[in-house]
Amino acid sequence: MNRNTIIGLVLIFAIFIGWSYLMQPSEEELEEQKQEQPAREKQRRAKDSIALVSRLEQQAAAEKEQAPNEQEVPALADTSGRYQQKVHKYGSFANAGEGSDRFITVENDVMKLVFLNRGGRIYSVELKNYKTFDSVPLILFNADSAHFGYHFLSKNIPLSTNDLYFKAEMADGSEITGNRIVLSENDSVQIRLRLYADGNSGNIDREKYLEQAYTIYGDKYMLDYDLNILGLGADMKSTRGDGLLELYWETYLRKQEKTQDRLSGTTIYYRANDKEVDYLSESDEDEKNFTDKLEWVSMKQRFFSSSLIINDDFFDNPKLAHTMHQDPANERYLKTMMATLDVPIYGTMNSSTNMRFYFGPNDYNILRKYKIDLERQIPLGWSFFLMQWINRFVVIPVFAWLGSYGWNYGIVILVLTIMLKIVLFPIAYRTYRSTAKMRVLKPEVDEIAKKYPKKEDAMKKQQATMALYKQVGVNPMAGCVPMLLQFPILIALFRFFPASIELRQKSFLWADDLSSYDSIASLPFEIPFYGDHVSLFTLLMTVSTIIYTYMNNQMMSSSQQMPGMKTMMYLMPIMFLGWFNNYASGLSYYYMLANIFTFGQMFIIRQTINEEKIYKKLQENKKKPKKRSGFQKRLEEAAKRQQQKQKRR
């Protein structure tokens, strides 16, 4: 910086100071300004107010002319720019991004539904006719255990309906004034929860909305659920592709029963577009992505389920999963169920998708009325046609008929057991008679065994034994066929009793719940494979089974049993003791009754069968000419071939 530059800057600074000093007002002028300032400020504010009102009136008139259906609340009142901040966060649904929670309760004869305007969803479901194992209201889910919402894009901003506030209206469009609606048996009501988009002026546009409409009936567990979209166009876009709206459903199942055994079936069930019903693993965590489309999805536990059904269409790109939460926030937490589904909407200008919800018990007679295979969630042995036929067409109708008399269900099981034993008596009689024939022939069979004591003579011993049976006209398999006929019934009832909701919380004698174990003593420790309690019905069933095994072995010819079979027959009841200790006490009670009545049948049959006459009849059969059956011919030929092989060796 040279000398001339420095002189210039000093002169400029001196001029600036001199000008400021000369232009400074005098003390008289300052006092005059101080007196005039309030009047000028008042005049300025009045002019600004007049200008603002005029501007707002002009804007409102223009908006009314351009969009007569919009709500007459000027967005320009948001002079701070807060509305634009909401647009950046919520896209075309800025006005719906803020609000206050409102709960609407709809109560019918069987359940209590609570709706929440935030998300336009069902907030909680309570089944009025049921309680939990510890006698508190049975709630399928509530806000802390369920998430149900649609994901979409608005102005390329990802949104979820769960974060937006819907307006609650009646079917006629009128506002819902109260917070509680009670329906009687023949009544119905429709609750409409609408998510309005914003118009061009920033006000809500009542001609553009996403609507969730729920129709509740006075005495039903099923409710209609319609997803309606009108006029949204570019305001809402799919995150997956055109014509599909992503639905995310997550539920924390709550523990409703005292115990959850392996027959509980707590998992996700679904029916695909090929009409086949399937489910995820019941015991382990599982996840599945589908190429097939689905008709319905159900979050199912032992006695209750929450199901979403689509009418006349399919859910696309389904993904289902269930898992165990690592750190459950609720002491009633059981399992986490998740489903991601694409709902077809066929455009966002004007679309309607009809669906249904089922919240209720897994009662066969209720579920089958809907004719969409919801009843296949009840484990009745669907994989084996004979087993499910026995349950569907015999056991369930008879059980319901006996229960209609109002008897205690312990008595119902008793009568059912008697009826089944009467029906099966001819089979039991034939089985016992075949056993009696084998028993009277036992001395002769033992003589054959003494004649061929060596192992290499086993084939000769078998041929001689079969020749004896042929001579006397005895079929050694005759006793097995009746037992095989009884086996499907045995297994069918094994599936029926743990799945029967009729037994839930029904007491009998010392059992307070026939659908759960009947503990008479708690152990201070847990025994592997057994548990930490003693179930008396299971213990009595085990004892009766051991007695039956002993009696059966006494009647059977020991020579006809396979090596080690006798020991195995005694081990099986001991294994049952561990398996059944945590199962439904009604099942153990039935098996105990079945054993007791079998003892009675055996006594009666034994009194009516004269084994001496049977023996004489068999000896007479030896004298009659015999015609070899095809089976006997094949058996003898096989024996000859075996002998020839042994000779070559």
Image (cartoon, grey):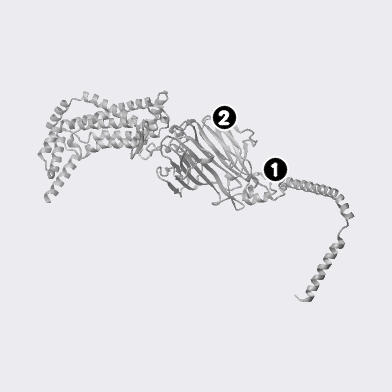
Question: Amino acid under label 1?
Answer: Gln
Percent from the top left, x then y, of residue 258?
A: 42, 34
* Residue 362: quarter of image: top left
Question: Amino acid under label 2?
Answer: Leu
Residue sitting at the far left: 451
- Disc tally is 2
Up the image or down, 588 lies above or below 59; here it is: above
Up the image or down, 13 lies above or below 413; here it is: below
Residue sitting at the far right: 28
Residue 183, numbered label = 2
- Of mark 2 and mark 1, the one earlier in the sequence is 1
Up the image or down, 649 lies above or below 377; here it is: below
Does any portion of residue 565 appear in the rendered image? yes
Residue 71, numbered label = 1
Tag 1 secondary structure: loop
Is 321 displayed left or right of 460 in the figure? right
- Identity of the residue drawn at 77% across and 46% down: 57
